[in-house]
């Protein structure tokens, strides 16, 4: 398998964490690639990373799809639980991916010259992240490893990477304690950008 990704991307990191947790990372050749680059566009017409080329040539894109595919490779404990716990895991993944989407968009907008419309977009993305962190603080994820907890950890790690000057831990102590414990897991510790 070949994975086109950026290690600093919360979505690329999520894929690698899943691969390591499933103990199949040695089956994946990683290729550093940026969106809209020739190798990426050749696999994903949307020009977005991560994207994966499976051993049979199937081209997969979007971290959610790739992670679910990887969950079927190997024989480790599944990261997508059965129905009862599955909805909670998928809900957490959706919330975490929303945090990551908002943070990535905000970072992109902040790299451009300031103007009122752009400043409004930046503030809107900040509010999305703040509301989502409040939800996670009120209902801290479980300590087990599944697609939801992996996605939350990757989203929080991205906030640390790109917005270190805006610490989130003081206002979210329970979530901060959970994150510290999760970061002790080898699959997360090995993928810190």
Image (spheres, helix red, strand yellow):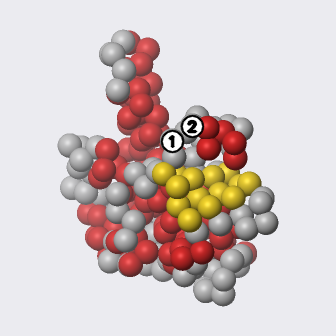
Q: Position of residue 168 (x, y in %)?
A: 27, 51
Specify few, some or many for label 2: CA neighbours under 10 Å numbering under 14, 14-19, or 20 or more.
few
- Residue at the location (65% across, 66% down)? 1
Q: Judging from the image, what secondary structure is the residue with disc 1 in?
A: loop
Give the tally of numbered discs.
2
- Residue at the location (71% across, 55% down)? 60
| Mark carried by residue 37 | 2
Residue 7, by quadrant, is bottom left
Q: Judging from the image, what secondary structure is the residue with disc 2 in?
A: loop
Q: Is residue 177 visible?
A: yes
Residue 184, by quadrant, is bottom left
Specify few, some or many for label 1: CA neighbours under 10 Å numbering under 14, 14-19, or 20 or more.
some
| Mark carried by residue 34 | 1
Label 1 near label 2: C-beta < 8 Å?
yes
Q: Position of residue 16 (x, y in %)?
A: 51, 65
Q: Is residue 106 left or right of residue 169?
A: right
């Amino acid at each position: 398998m070949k994975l086109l990704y950026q290690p600093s991307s919360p979505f690329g990191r999520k894929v690698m964490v899943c691969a390591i947790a499933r103990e199949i990372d040695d089956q994946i050749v990683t290729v550093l690639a940026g969106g809209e680059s020739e190798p990426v566009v050749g696999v994903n017409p949307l020009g977005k990373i991560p994207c994966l080329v499976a051993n049979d040539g199937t081209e997969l894109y979007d971290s959610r799809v790739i992670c679910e595919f990887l969950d079927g490779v190997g024989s480790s404990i599944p990261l997508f639980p059965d129905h009862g716990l599955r909805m909670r895991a998928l809900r957490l993944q959706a919330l975490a991916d929303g945090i990551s989407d908002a943070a990535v968009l905000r970072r992109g907008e902040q790299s451009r010259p300031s103007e009122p419309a752009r400043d409004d977009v930046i503030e809107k993305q900040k509010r999305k992240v703040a509301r989502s962190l409040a939800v996670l603080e009120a209902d801290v994820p479980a300590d087990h490893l599944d697609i939801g907890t992996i996605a939350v950890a990757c989203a929080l790690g991205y906030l640390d990477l790109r917005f270190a000057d805006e610490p989130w831990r003081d206002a979210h102590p329970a979530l901060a304690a959970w994150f510290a414990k999760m970061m002790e897991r080898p699959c997360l510790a090995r993928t810190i950008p």
